[in-house]
Image (cartoon, rainbow, N blue to C red):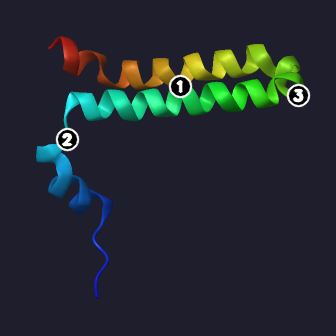
Amino acid sequence: MRIPSLSERWHRVRKDFTLRDLLIDTSGKFLLGLGMGALLATRLVQYGWVLAVAGLALSFTVKAKHWKQFWA
């Protein structure tokens, strides 16, 4: 039995995937990150700024990649 690729799986569920699903998924990941941050706060305090800058850099990278396409 062949295992479908991620692309094939996405094409199969894409038509049923809604913005609400995306928001619920994103909210869940945000709460998971917040919870993990709370649990690890004392250990990660010295890396706080590094983690914040890394997060911004990742976000900026994705936005820069799609900037021209979005505003075209």
Q: Quadrant of residue 8?
A: bottom left
Q: Which mark is residue 17?
A: 2
Q: Amino acid at mark 1?
A: Leu
Quick one: 43 or 59, which is closer to the camera? 43
Q: Quadrant of residue 70?
A: top left
From the image, tell me which residue sits under label 3. 43
Q: Nearer the viewer, mark 1 or mark 3?
A: 3
Q: Is residue 54 left or right of residue 41?
A: left
Quick one: 71 or 46, which is closer to the camera? 46
Q: Secondary structure at mark 2?
A: loop
Quick one: 50 or 11, which is closer to the camera? 11
Q: Is residue 38 above or below residue 2?
A: above
Disc 1 to disc 3, C-alpha distance: 23 Å
Q: Which mark is residue 26?
A: none
Q: Amino acid at mark 2?
A: Phe
Name the residue at 19% across, 11% down: 71
Q: Amino acid at mark 3?
A: Arg
Badge 1: residue crowd in 10 Å (few <14, some 14–19, many ≥20): few
Q: Position of residue 32 (x, y in %)?
A: 58, 33
Q: Is residue 12 left or right of residue 4?
A: left
Q: Quadrant of residue 38?
A: top right
